[in-house]
Structures are given as C-alpha cells and as structure tokens.
Image: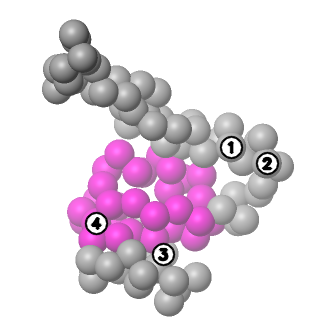
Amino acid sequence: FANYLHHKNDILTGLVGGEMMFSNSKGLMLQRLKSFLNLKTDEVMCVGDGANDLAMFNESGLKIAFCAKEILRSKADICIDIKDLKEIIKVI
C-alpha cells in the first residue's frame, strides 16, 4: 500500500506513482482491507494529517488527526498536536 519512486538509468527522477496518489486512494484501500479482514467500520482506527486522508476517515470508526490541517481536524474524533507518534498510544 505505497507509492513508488520513478527512476531512469538507476537515478530517481523525482516523479512518484502508484495507487495511493489520488484523493480517494486511502479510502478505497481501507475498504478493500476491511473486506479482506472482515472488519466493520467501528473496528477500524486511522491516523491522518491532511486532505488526502479524508476518504480514509470516512471508512474508519476512530479518526485521529495528527498535527493535521484544519480540513481534517474538523472531521476527527481526536486531535493530537504534539509531534510525537507515542501520543497516539495515550488515546487508544
């Protein structure tokens, strides 16, 4: 579930590709993963920081905005503003 880096003659070109490049990509991937693992929405938690995470938030029960932009903060159940991923442990 990741993007890939383009290269030419064994040198990175600066271009990025892959399934996760689009605004709905994370949401679609989470739908597929939920189906594969037979999970309900309320059994899923996600952490995001920007607009590209909105579709993923729609597929999740618990939504955590981590040092996030306002567009995502407004959709989150929990907002964490300390730049330390260990802060997530305190809320789950």
Rendered residue at 22%/11% (across/down): 8
- Alpha carbon separation for disc pair 1 and 4: 24 Å
Which span is picked out in magenta? Answer: 45-73
In the rendering, at what x and y percent does residue 72 appear? 34, 61
Left or right of 24 on screen, residue 79: left
Of the numbered discs 1 and 3, the one sitting upstream in the chain is: 1
Using the rendered view, name the quadrant where residue 48 is placed: bottom left
Residue type (three-letter) at the residue carrying disc 3: Asp
Of the numbered discs 1 and 4, the one sitting upstream in the chain is: 1
Residue type (three-letter) at the residue carrying disc 1: Leu
Residue type (three-letter) at the residue carrying disc 4: Ala
Using the rendered view, name the quadrant where residue 68 is placed: bottom left
Of the numbered discs 3 and 2, the one sitting upstream in the chain is: 2
Q: Secondary structure at mark 2?
A: helix
Residue indicated by mark 1? 33
- Alpha carbon separation for disc pair 1 and 2: 6 Å
- Alpha carbon separation for disc pair 4 and 3: 12 Å
Question: Within 10 Å of the Cα at label 4, are there few (<14), some (14-19), or many (20+) other Cα atoms?
Answer: many
In the rendering, at what x and y percent does residue 23 appear? 38, 36
- Alpha carbon separation for disc pair 1 and 3: 22 Å
Whether residues under marks 1 and 2 lie with C-beta atoms below 8 angstroms apart, the answer is yes
Residue indicated by mark 2? 37
Work out whether residue 44 can be spotted.
Answer: yes
Q: Is residue 31 magenta?
A: no
Of the numbered discs 2 and 4, the one sitting upstream in the chain is: 2
Residue type (three-letter) at the residue carrying disc 2: Leu
Residue indicated by mark 3? 77
In the rendering, at what x and y percent does residue 41 appear? 69, 58
Work out whether residue 24 can be spotted.
Answer: no
